[in-house]
Amino acid sequence: MAEQPWLIVGLGNPGTQYERTRHNIGQMVVDELARRASAGFKSHKTNARVAEGRIVPGGPRLILAKPNTYMNTSGGPVAQLVRFYSLDPARLIVVHDELDIPFDTIKLKSGGGHGGHNGVRDIASAIGTPDFIRVRVGVGRPPGRTDAADHVLSPFTSAERQVLPNLVSDGADAVELVTTQGLVAAQQRYHAPS
């Protein structure tokens, strides 16, 4: 029996006003994976845009998805995708922004709490388990007394935009490493002290 594909979901908000915000970093990473796989996104009946492909010939099949819903209601489309493709939640990777990780840092984990991230909370509730892999892309805490919601919904600073292509590439590399060598190998690479 062929190995199950990986479902990789990039979290974000729909609409051009959110495209380049910190909250949409997950979708930016999934866009990079689609570029590497030469795969285009198409509308899917699960209320998401989906692209399928392989990054390396003979490598794992990737189902890349961007829900059409707002971040906080990502669970419905993700649960529908898991059912549509008959996947075990262990084959789900969710890529999302993370306030509690410094900007330009990647951390990975499987299961556990949602850490206040409403998109992750909604997915865990909708699929009935928190046991899926998260690629957490650090966007850092807001400066001063800036509200966290305002921070994640604002565009990257000009200094951050200089580094952003590398951060997106690192996020895509981390996902690739999980799908080819496993979570532990990816954690060892991205969690090692620099």
Image (cartoon, rainbow, N blue to C red):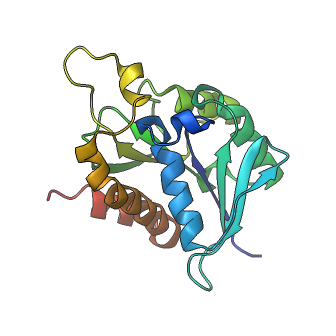
Seen from the viewer's position, the closer of residues 39 and 97 is: 39
Q: Position of residue 157 (x, y in %)?
A: 29, 39
Relative vertical location of residue 113 with respect to residue 40 in this rendering, above or below? above
Q: Position of residue 48 (x, y in %)?
A: 73, 45
Relative vertical location of residue 151 with respect to residue 91 in this rendering, above or below? above
Q: Locate the N terminus and report the quarter of the image it occupies.
A: bottom right
| Left or right: 188 in relation to 183 | left
Relative vertical location of residue 186 with respect to residue 109 in this rendering, above or below? below
Q: Is there any visible trace of residue 4 in the rendered image?
A: no
Q: Residue furthest bottom?
A: 57
Please give the name of the residue rendered at 58% of the width and 31% of the height, measured from the top-left corner. Answer: 71
Seen from the viewer's position, the closer of residues 116 and 46 is: 46
Seen from the viewer's position, the closer of residues 110 and 105 is: 105
Q: Is there any visible trace of residue 70 in the rendered image?
A: yes
Q: Residue furthest right?
A: 45
| Left or right: 99 in relation to 1 | left
Q: Position of residue 185 (x, y in %)?
A: 37, 66
Please give the name of the residue rendered at 62% of the width and 85% of the height, measured from the top-left corner. Answer: 58
| Left or right: 189 in relation to 51 | left
| Left or right: 168 in relation to 83 | left
Relative vertical location of residue 188 with respect to residue 123 in this rendering, above or below? below
Q: Quadrant of residue 17?
A: top right
Please give the name of the residue rendered at 70% of the width and 66% of the height, measured from the top-left corner. Answer: 52
Seen from the viewer's position, the closer of residues 166 and 127 is: 166
Please give the name of the residue rendered at 44% of the width and 68% of the height, measured from the top-left corner. Answer: 177
Q: Quadrant of residue 13?
A: top right
Q: Position of residue 125 (x, y in %)?
A: 64, 28
